[in-house]
Image (spheres, coloured by chain):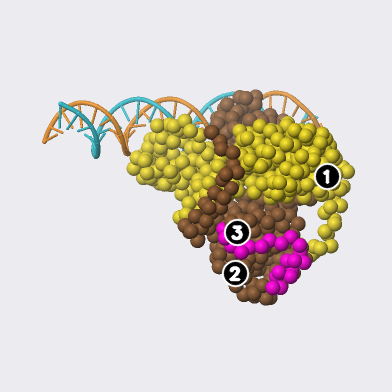
Chain colours: A brown, B yellow, C orange, D cyan
Amino acid sequence: MNEGKTRSSLSAYIIRNLDEMRPSEQKVGEIVISEPEKVMRMSIAALSDKAGVSEPTVLRFCRQLGLGGFTDLKLALATDVATGMPFVDADVSMIDTPQIVGDKMLGTAMKQLNLVKSQLNYDQVVAAAEVIGSARRIDICGIAQSNFVAAEVQHRLARMGYCAIAMADPHMQLQAAASMEAGDAALIMSFAGQSKETVDVARLARRVGAKVIVISRSTSALAQEADILINVDSDEQTFLYSSSSTRIAHLMVIDILTTILAINVGEPMIERLRRSRLATNEYWIPTNE
Amino acid sequence: MNEGKTRSSLSAYIIRNLDEMRPSEQKVGEIVISEPEKVMRMSIAALSDKAGVSEPTVLRFCRQLGLGGFTDLKLALATDVATGMPFVDADVSMIDTPQIVGDKMLGTAMKQLNLVKSQLNYDQVVAAAEVIGSARRIDICGIAQSNFVAAEVQHRLARMGYCAIAMADPHMQLQAAASMEAGDAALIMSFAGQSKETVDVARLARRVGAKVIVISRSTSALAQEADILINVDSDEQTFLYSSSSTRIAHLMVIDILTTILAINVGEPMIERLRRSRLATNEYWIPTNE
DNA sequence: TCAAATCATGTAGTTTTACTAACCAACGTG
DNA sequence: CACGTTGGTTAGTAAAACTACATGATTTGA
């Protein structure tokens, strides 16, 4: 019964399928999910002993999970323990305890970061950094949750000395976009990439000759309007209708983008950022750690 | 030479110490860091063969790293590969390629999420959710980067129907704090917890009888002023003087906190959030996916 | 400079572990 | 009662991990 679907967490899979397993394999499964960090250092003999079953049963248990053998189980467990996230992919539900809610949300965020790592197109990021670095002015547009990210980008670029403006109001965004010209850059962000206003802003900015950098889903309407597309795809997370993990992905992309930009500029930028930090120094309570 | 310090990433450790290793162990190390996902499925024989050294050399290599044996190496590699992050802890440097910059930053973020998972005190989070849920008014204060987080909290709580106000200006924060009374809540955030203004706001709010919820480092000056302390400790990240990973930790804490709050309230809150989502529905471009 | 000591690494052997195969005994079902 | 399912027993094998020892190289010091 080795179904082809990929599995993000072995523990989660075992938990889900425990009921359908054979009695002795359930015994093994219970130990595996309750103390994976121990099991991954056990021998078959030790585990079979602890579960009160025979060695071949442990092996049958592994095969049942679609694994090659016990060694694979150990590696898979190490992976599970490493991500620390038994609930990767799991949706939060109303009956979860606070701890479970937290673990599930952190697991989803973790998965999202991994997704960014694997799918981020650095050519596009570098291209975006170059456009921003040489732009006369940078308009940063996002709506709703993306607006918060936009505000952060503005602050970050301002600290780096760039002329960057984030606008919350979509009408202002449109007016600003209309006033752009060649040599300007528009950085447009949207989690889903399907807000009408945002797409309109991108289209307008592009028509007047500005370079349009988009951070969004690659299949979105907004992505169509991009000169430079930094794609951040993600699974929808529907509980409470907020996409917290996508926002974290966008923040990371912004961080990486601005860091690359700073490195490209080099020492003068580092010096500038140092000054920026020193500016607030006297408002800090000294620590004696 | 097994030093006591904990190590968050084996690969990173190997890379750092490769120069000081014995020649044949260097050969082993190079293979381990270049293709860990293969090595973790190899036998000692296969690895020693590939490195052109003897089997005991491989074993000595493991011991040199402070590991119990080859099996431990495999598990450690599985951990490394799972987090997907060879550069956990590594500082970004000026000579890194874009890809490396991204990997390092994502690795740091990942580590931070794991830290949140292991150290988050859910009793305090639940207590905070209760205070916020029953507060007459919630003032949200943060300065500099925390101000962006504060703005998000305001939006989130507003959408949930609470009377929440985030203020950027520290003088306004002080004035608002002075006007609070018993039954009000102040949610005060700071990455380092050492800004004078923020500490003053907390102290003032507490003096006038408001419940003070603090999200910050547990050893910070701000933490001293908390009625409810949600501690988010982290290593400093100094490159470019921005603490992006700490900000992500704070965002996650906020997400978890508000989600727990919503679950506590139950169905009416879910309904309210559904309405909140529907409000912008007509501004979305329908997808035919 | 040359012997002693230490270090680096390979050879050979032992023990443990994972895995296979074949068989058999309960157990429940039609 | 035949029959499939489940799972234990036994025994054996191959390979993997690990150990002890030996040897050649390198450094050290009188």
Instruction: Give the residue pinned by disc 3.
Output: A157
Residue D3 screen position, x and y as percent: 74, 36
Under mark 1, the amino acid is: Tyr
Could you say which is closer to the camera, residue B181 or residue A264?
B181
User: Can residue B8 be seen from the camera position used here?
Assistant: yes
Q: Residue at x 53, y 46 (%)?
A: B238
How crowded pointer 2 is (Cα within 10 Å; few <14, some 14-19, many 20+) is rated as some
Residue A223 falls inside the magenta stretch: no
Q: Which of the 4 quarters of the picture holds residue A94?
A: top right
Residue sitting at x 71%, y 49%: B168
Tag 2: amino acid: Arg
| CA gap, disc 1 and disc 2 | 42 Å
Q: Are marks 3 and 1 on the same chain?
A: no
**Residue at image mark 1:** B162
Marked residue nearer the N-terminal end (2 or 3): 2
Q: Which mark is residue A136?
A: 2
The amino acid at mark 3 is Leu
**Cα distance in 3D space between marks 2 and 3:** 13 Å
Indicate the chain on which mark 3 is placed: A
Q: Quadrant of residue A51?
A: top right
- Taking A238 as reference, is A13 above or below it? above
- Which SS class for mark 2? loop
Can you give x and y, in whole percent of width and height, for residue B122 in the image? Answer: 71, 33
Question: Label 1: how many residues lie within 10 Å, few (<14), some (14-19) or many (20+)?
Answer: some
Q: Is residue A126 left or right of residue B70?
A: right
Judge whether residue B47 can be spotted in this image: no
> In the rendered structure, the residue with mark 1 lies on which chain?
B
Instruction: Name the image quarter holding the N terminus of chain B.
Output: top left
Q: Quadrant of the C terminus of chain B?
A: bottom right
Residue span colored magenta: A160-179
